[in-house]
Image (cartoon, rainbow, N blue to C red):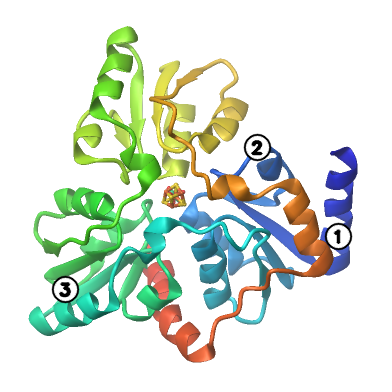
Amino acid sequence: MKDLVEEINQLKKEKDAVILAHYYVMDDIQDIADYVGDSYYLSEIATQVSQTTICFAGVKFMGESAKILCPDKTVLLPEVLADCPMAGMADVDKIIEMKEKYNDLAVVCYINSSAELKMYSDVCVTSSNAIKIVKALPNKNIYFIPDENLGRYVASQVPEKKFIFNEGFCHVHTSISKENVWKAKIAKPQMKVLVHPECKKDVLELADYIGSTSGIIDYATKSKSSDFLICTELGVLHELKEKNPDKHFYSVGHRQFCPNMKKITLEKVANSLRNMETEVKIAENMRTRAFMPLKKMLELAN
Ligand code: 13P
Ligand code: SF4
């Protein structure tokens, strides 16, 4: 294990590579990463690093987004089969149909989406900036893809716009039930409930705080409370415990585990750097079209 970490550090120098990791990957991967963060932070930092190679410890849409934004860099996915099922849960024909049906429509695409869906979208968002970006759009009608729960949450915060929803979902977040949140609250009433907006509406209604993985970590770190119920994937516990060794974090059930994020191992990261694989490749016509909504997100989020 120590040898593998040393090898990865050596390979990073040899290959002029940087490792980006999402909070949901395993603890040992977060420990060797140069940057760890939520989806927005990782897409922005990809555009700012000086290294010529990015090894992306995250699911496929994250590596794809980095490549779309940084075409001159080599972007590597240590495990090409680590894909987010939600990324494909919308339909290009339906997007085209909605564009024809509604005047003044913006197609707002959660970054958890394939490059193909991004091609047909007007702007990308993440859970940390979706409300701000939708509010800033001049359009009255919003077609929000692919995540229905995030879309409905954003709609509740931007009542002046008309939303059309799509039926995509995250199986990890929708596995969290309001009954289990209630049970945990009854056992520890002082506990603050921190919820990711990919959760269902009835869970969001029980939240003390709703936000992205970074938002949840920041909230718990700044809070005077000491007990928190974590309603997102449990990879965030690594950073939460590191920043808050005296606070207590509780889970809701046994399914807060993203099997795709957990496919990435130290061995796969080392192998990826050794052999410079698997390189993200996107056809240039697709890349230039998918670039527009991502670029617009970076502009509107700041
Ligand atoms: P954030 O880290 O942006 O909150 O995204 C959560 C997620 O589900 C990523 O797949
Ligand atoms: Fe996709 Fe959910 Fe896993 Fe995030 S946690 S990568 S949204 S399946």
On the image, the x and y values in percent for residue 246 come to: 56, 15
- Quadrant containing the C terminus in the rendered view: bottom left
Question: Is label 3 in a helix, a strand or a loop?
Answer: loop
Where 238 sits versus 143, above or below? above
On the image, the x and y values in percent for residue 159 come to: 10, 54
Q: Is 192 placed left or right of 83 in the picture? A: left
Q: Quadrant of residue 242?
A: top right
Residue visible at 51% across and 17% down in the picture:
247
What residue does disc 2 label? Answer: 27
Of the two numbered discs 3 and 2 on the same chain, state the one appearing first in sequence: 2
Q: Amino acid at mark 1?
A: Leu
On the image, the x and y values in percent for residue 266 come to: 75, 47
Q: Amino acid at mark 3?
A: Asn
Residue visible at 49% across and 64% down in the picture:
61
Residue visible at 29% across and 78% down in the picture:
92
As drawn, the label of residue 11 is 1
Q: Is 8 placed left or right of 149 in the picture? A: right
Question: Is label 1 in a helix, a strand or a loop?
Answer: helix
Q: Amino acid at mark 2?
A: Asp
* Label 1 within 8 A of ligand 2 by Cβ: no
Where 82 sits versus 238, above or below? below
Residue visible at 79% across and 63% down in the picture:
273
Q: Is residue 164 visible?
A: yes
Of the two numbered discs 1 and 2 on the same chain, state the one appearing first in sequence: 1
Question: Is label 2 in a helix, a strand or a loop?
Answer: helix
- Quadrant containing the N terminus in the rendered view: top right
Crowding near the residue tagged with mark 1, few <14, some 14–19, many ≥20 C-alpha atoms within 10 Å: some
Of the two numbered discs 1 and 3 on the same chain, state the one appearing first in sequence: 1
What residue does disc 3 label? Answer: 139
CA gap between label 1 and label 3 equals 47 Å
Q: 287 or 271, which is in the foreground?
A: 271
Which is closer to the viewer, label 3 or label 2? 2
